[in-house]
Image (cartoon, rainbow, N blue to C red):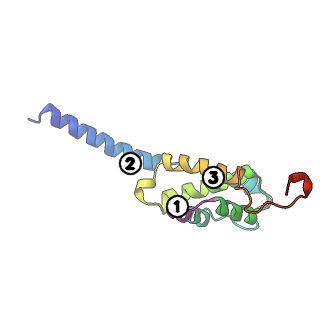
């Protein structure tokens, strides 16, 4: 007969294993904005896989994503900030599900990236150089 502590340990281990698997399987990617998908703002097809891989590489190398957000903005100049953020989030989610290491296949990784994407799109970094505006600005 198996003792209660062993049964409890086995039960908790099984629960932890199925919870991790359920989290990975439950990762659902957002759909790119219908407005973005239906208008001619894309200058061609949107490759979520390609954009997602670039985001994944950037994050794995611990680099800033602001330059990548600027590239996406350049590629889709007529898209709104919200549409660009949606595109980046959907692309990163696709990367998490297909190319990322197994440990990253979870909602927490996507939620962390959502904030980074919003910051990159809605709050671009300040320019390196301040323009000379004359005596009124003290320079």
Quadrant containing the N terminus is top left
| Real-space CA distance between mark 3 and mark 1, rounded to the nearest whole angstrom | 14 Å
* Label 1: few (<14), some (14–19) or many (≥20) C-alpha neighbours in 10 Å: few
Q: Is residue 3 visible?
A: yes
Quadrant containing the C terminus is bottom right
Label 3: which secondary element:
helix
User: x, y (%) of residue 82?
Assistant: 72, 49
The one of 132 and 22 positioned closer to us in this rendering: 132
Tell me the mark number nearer the camera, choosing from 3 and 1: 1
Q: Are marks 3 and 1 in contact (CB under 8 Å)?
A: no
What label does residue 62 carry, if any?
Answer: 1
Residue behind mark 3: 117
Q: Please say if 96 is above or below 13.
A: below
User: x, y (%) of residue 116?
Assistant: 60, 51
Direction from residue 130 to residue 52 in the image, left or right: left
Mark 1 and mark 2 lie on one chain; the one further toward the N terminus is: 2
Q: Which residue reaches farthest right?
A: 135
Label 1: which secondary element:
loop
What label does residue 21 carry, if any?
Answer: 2
Mark 2 and mark 3 lie on one chain; the one further toward the N terminus is: 2
Highlighted range, magenta: 56-65
- The residue depicted at 64 percent of the width and 65 percent of the height is 47
């Amino acid at each position: 007969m198996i003792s209660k502590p062993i049964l409890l340990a086995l039960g908790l281990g099984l629960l932890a294993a199925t919870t991790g698997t359920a989290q990975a399987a439950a990762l659902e990617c957002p759909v790119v904005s219908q407005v973005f998908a239906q208008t001619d703002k894309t200058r061609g097809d949107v490759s979520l896989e390609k954009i997602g891989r670039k985001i994944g590489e950037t994050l794995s190398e611990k680099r800033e994503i602001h330059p990548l957000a600027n590239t996406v903005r350049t590629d889709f100049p007529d898209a709104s900030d919200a549409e660009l953020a949606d595109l980046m989030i959907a692309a990163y989610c696709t990367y998490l599900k297909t190319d990322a290491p197994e440990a990253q296949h979870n909602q927490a990784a996507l939620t962390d990236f959502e904030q980074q994407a919003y910051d990159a799109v809605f709050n671009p970094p300040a320019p390196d150089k301040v323009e000379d505006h004359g005596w009124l600005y003290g320079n």
